[in-house]
Image (tube, coloured by chain):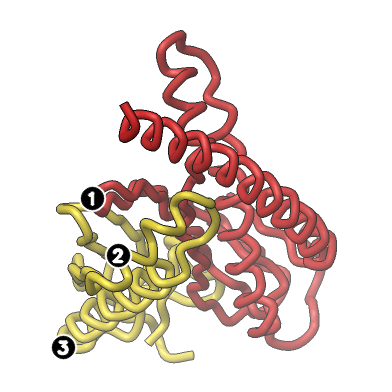
Amino acid sequence: MLVSNLEFLPGRTVVRHLGLVQGSSVRSKHVGRDIAASLKNFFGGELRGYTELLSDSREEATERMLAQARSMGANAVLNVRYSTSSIAAGAAEIFVYGTAVELDIE
Amino acid sequence: MNSLLFQAGSVVALLVLGFLFGRLAEKRHYRKIIQRESETQALPVVASRYPPEDRPYRQQLVTGSVVIASDYFKAFLAGLINIFGGRVTPYESMLDRARREAVLRMKAEALALGAAYVFNIKFDTTRIATGKVGAMEVLAYGTAMIPLGQAVGIQHEI
């Protein structure tokens, strides 16, 4: 499955547009990590635990989007966008969406 | 009276610690960023939506992200600046660091794939609030263009 945030691919033609596909994931951290993060907040710097959490969450959301695209019979998802929102204390939603298409055979 | 003194003392201690550690971390981080930026200069990151067509490319989405927290001193200073308004420089440098770090991580992923360019770079910045902790997440993503074979015709000029 080809995933790209460009709108078209040089040298390839889109045979069929299959429409919007999306995936999302809401995750939060266990309390221990939150306490460690609040300590870090006094001295500044990267919160590695959260960086990992969000990138895992992003992977999961992308996987859900790809599953949807596969079930539609797509072989590529174009014009992919990510969006993140903090929905409650300690939880963030990752949303990923794109256009599922069928490309000609390479 | 004693507890009031203790409270004031702990705030001052946190301010001093935040200032010292924060400054040290920021200086060290900037040094690293500048060094890594010059190392990865050969890989251009382009904000254009139109990919080059000089040769066949394989495409793959690459991402880089970082969650960064402010230190106690920065938060305090920002609170002071907020009263009078104006440029909140302590947070400007914090976000600048986060954004450049995210781009560098994205570039590292693209370089590992053997990419020649990263096209259509987008940024996504979110405040991650967890109770008292204020932190920002910066995500950078784009399409890595991995050349397949030799260039045909005119080289794409950027």
**Residue type beneath disc 2:** Asp
Q: Give the letter of the chain under mark 3.
A: A
Residues at marks 1 and 2, CA–CA distance in whole angstroms:
9 Å
- In the image, the chain rendered in red is B
- For marks 3 and 2 on the same chain, the one whose residue lies earlier in the sequence: 2
> Which dot marks residue A71?
3
Label 3, secondary structure: give it. Answer: helix
Query: Foreground residue, B79 or B99?
Result: B79
Q: Colour of chain A?
A: yellow
Disc 2 crowd rating (10 Å Cα; few below 14, some 14-19, many 20+) is many
Reading the image, the residue beneath label 1 is B131
Residues at marks 3 and 2, CA–CA distance in whole angstroms:
38 Å
> Mark 2 and mark 1 in contact (Cβ < 8 Å)?
yes
The picture quadrant where one finds residue A8 is bottom left
**Residue type beneath disc 3:** Ser
- In the picture, the quarter occupied by the N terminus of chain B is top left
> x%, y% of residue B16?
59, 39
